[in-house]
Image: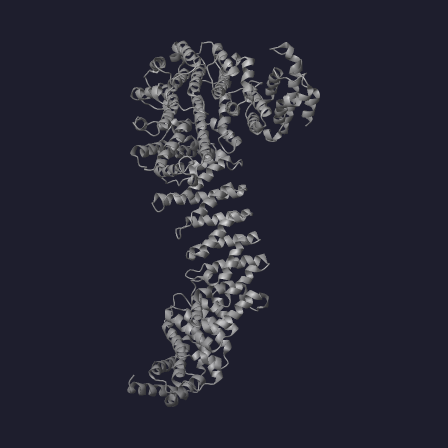
Amino acid sequence: MSDTDGKTAKELIRDVGKQLAAKQKCPHKDSLVKLLRQAASALPKLQAQSHLLKPAIKPLSDSLLKHGLLKQKDKDLRLLVAICVCEILRILAPNPGFSDEDFRDIYQLFLGMFVELADTKSPYFSKRVALLETIARYNFCVLMLDTGCEDLVLKMFNIFFSVIRKEHPSNVYGAMSSIMSLIFQEKVSQALLEVILQSLLKDSKDASFQLGVSVIEGCSQVLQPVVCRFLNCCILDRDGVNSELKESYHTIIYEIFKCAPEMLIAVVPNLTQELLTDQVDVRITAVKFVGRLFSIPGRHVAQEYHRLFIEFLNRFSDKSAAVRVNAVLCAKPFYFTNPSGEESIAVLSALEGRLLDFDDKVRIQAVAVVCDLAKSNLRPLPLEIIAQAAKRLRDKKVTVRKKVLQMLLDVYHHYCNRCSEGIIKLSLEFEQIPCGILMLCYDKDTDFGPQNIEHILEESLFPISLSVEERTRHWLFLFSHSASASDHRNAIFTSAHEKALTAILCQKKRLQIEMQSYLELRTNEKYFSVRKEERIKKLFAKMSTCFPIPIKAEESFHKLHLVKDADIFDSLKEILVELKFGSSRIMRDNCVSKSKMKDMQLDFEFLQSLTTKCSYNIFSFDHVSCILDHLSEDKFQEAKLKNACVSLLMVIVNAFPILLRGSEEQFCTLLLEDKSLFCNELLEMLAKAGPHISIDLSVIYPFLERICLDGSRAQAKLAVSAISGLMVTSEHSSLSDLCKKLVDALKSGPPTPTVLQSLGCMAQHSVSAFEPHAEEITRYIVENILLVNEVGMSDDIVSSECSSTSCNLKIFGLKALVRSFLPHQRTGVARPIDELLTLISRMLQRAEVSGGTLSGEDDKDHLRLAAATSVLRLSQMWDSHISPHIYHQTLLTAKDHSCMVRRLFLKKTFKLLKNNVLHCKYLCAFALAAASDSSQKDESLNYMAEIIRKHHREPKVADVTDDPVCSLMFLIHILAHDTDFPSQEDKYDSFFSPIVFTLEALLNPSFVDGDMNRIGKVVSDLHNTFNAIKRAEDALDVHKTSVSFLALPANLLRRKWQD
């Protein structure tokens, strides 16, 4: 500024001062505005020279006081006065010549100007900002402390935080922050501090919050002692703190730590005391806060305050479940904001430990946190913890299993989507989720079981948008890590998982078959009868068992049956035959939506479920095609992945053989490969799917014929079955020709196990093809195999349990003869069976067909076993022809001197009883085995228990004697005819122990699910059985009648009964 300008400004100010001083009263506003504007524009041109300028300015400053302009209410005047006063203070500093009272008025005027800063749209806003900056620049507010205006200082602080706005320019923030920082440099009072701390409780986006942070950052060293003293008092003696802020001290610590962590070095360690207190609510609050503190981005609090971290970690195992829950909740933000290191590993380890917490709420929360971590893309999670979380699907509490299931499904969806996008690779740990879900099939709770898990596999396991190719890839990965396909360490898909999956698919198939039967009955409207309605009712009852709540489902089926609109049933027919995944889904949705549009009185939730079950949505034609593509193109280099393809295809085809339809050519190409590694499996699929697919038999017949002549026994069985199945859909008739070739092969050279197997299977599949050659084949087997000492066999025969090749061939010959009397159609055999039974009887008695045919004891053991199992198999159709003598001989195999014979005979008996192909009178075998060999008592009891339990749970059969209770009658008869029947009473306990074993099994409540009504019924049936035996006459030997029961001492029976 030039000297001329300064002189001009000085004269102008003197002139304004004189004019105002000359007025006795306060001039009119217009006059004042004019004069003050002149002064306000001239004052900034003067430099700070108090001793030189004071005479020129004094008239103006005196006039401002004289006319009371410091207390002026008019906004225009007040702003001009404030500007002039501010400039006077600047120019005349440090002695402006105002009294303390004048200073108070001046500061009140300034505070009024600060309040008006809230109006950012005012035309005077820029002038008010300039005034604020001037006051801040020249430290005018520090004088407030020297003039006894501490109350105004507090008021100013509050004004600043109340008027600050987000839209204010940065220079406003800077000026306010500077003023407050200068005040703190001079004096730090509790009241002023609380104003600053109060601002930290606002939202972090709020302007007052940002202003408070700015002040703390600007004077952290000055504030540190007071802040630490206040916060430590809140931590250690909160009741003694006289401030409302004591309830929010955690938030204050948190916000200060974010902006000035060095201030709290003496505060943070004291938080350990809160983690150790006996008060649960205090520990909960402390855990939440410390976890939040450790999760501040960019800070390393856990590393810097190690003791606090250790105590925080201990809260994961706190005695209070509520504390543990809150500790678990802290794991997620902690893991994301802390770099990898010991602390992160420790927190994850603590989190993993809570997956096994004894409190279900903690376990649920731990799984929830693990799932959130797994779904986040911020940091990869160690996969082992995913596998541990999946194990909670086996939790002891149903509520936990239900919640964990939903959370893990969400995780699995996220994982599948990321795999399909190529972001991550398929993972063993994530794939344990579907494994765990499959195991829920074995859960007896109504929320699980096959019915509910089927719905999950259909609708919830994979994301809706996931392609069939991706779904198949996940299934193949599972099967490639089965116990048979990979080493034990990486096996996650066990036989139990495959069994569960198979059960679900079979359940689905069963409903589809029953539904097709119902729709066929419904279509035939002209055929109406009581029998038809009863059959429909039975179909509904069967199909209802495939739903989670059978009673409700059955009611819905009956309501559906009353619907007259044929469209819905036509849609169901179409869904049942649609093999493609996408088309099936569209049809299902259309069926439900059309029904809703027609406003049918239906349970649409049930209809949705029914159409889902009728659809091929777990596996479809597209899945099968995808698997065959993999096999055909040889995409997989590893053998275990190829095995997985075949294993998965086997599971699918076994349940839904029709899904091979459309892929016949591709399938045949694989089967006919010269070096097919999976010939057996593909043959089995062909045998299963034969009636459902269209293959020209003439194309594949030469291959199958070669298998029947030169393949293994297992392959031959499958090949004959495949030919028989394909003949249903093919015009090619070849079983008769094949039978002739097999007979020629049998007679032309040394007999082979394969040819014998093929002939036996041929007899079962086609009686008409076999019967013309039956006599010739039977004679050849008896004369050239069974009645000779040694028989030449090919070297590749695999024998079992060390039997000789000659013995094996005899067994194969016997099996062929037995099969010839067991056609699958159960009719058509006109030949007498007596000759075969006589042959078997001799083998049971001496393990020989004629004298001297076998020399080794092992061979005799195997032959006896083969004879006994032959009787078991023949009893399915020829029980009336099996004499009591042969029956007794067969059951006495359970007491055979050979442990191997006993074990395998009991195993075979149990299998046939469990499959409902054997009469319950063969239960005696378990009682006889238990009595003869104590080492087999437990195994026999387990077999017995399983059959008793099965008969208790399943509907009663037509034959009243086919019941476990009636087996006791047959057992008594066997013992009565035993040549070792004791003559002395002291040997009764040992001899009659099979009866005691049977009684104990029949009267064990645990074998009938604790049903005491059933036990009462058994007692009554036993009483009737004993009375019937007393009155009966032995059909074999009248002299044995008394032995059958009366020889059994009454006191022994009574004693055992009482026990």
In the displayed structure, does residue 199 sit left or right of residue 729?
Answer: right
Residue 1028 seen: no
Reply above or below: 97 against 375: below
Observer-nearest residue: 1023 or 96?
A: 1023
Residue situated furthest right in the rendering: 1051
- Residue at the (55%, 65%) spot, across then down: 235
Residue 147 in percent (x, y) is at 49, 82
State the count of labels: 0
Q: Quadrant of the N terminus?
A: bottom left
Q: Position of residue 653 (x, y in %)?
A: 39, 28
Q: Is residue 418 visible?
A: yes
The residue shown at (54%, 41%) is 398
Task: Identify which residue, 536 or 98, lies in the foreground.
Answer: 536
Q: Position of residue 211 (x, y in %)?
A: 43, 68
Where residue 463 sits in the image (x, y, percent)?
39, 41
Q: Is residue 180 above or below residue 462?
A: below
Quadrant containing the C terminus is top right
Color theme of the render: one colour
Of residue 997 and residue 370, the one placed in the foreground of this image is 997
Q: Place residue 1015 in its image quadrant.
A: top right
Pick the residue in front: 115 or 734: 734
The part of the image, by quadrant, that contains residue 261 is: bottom left
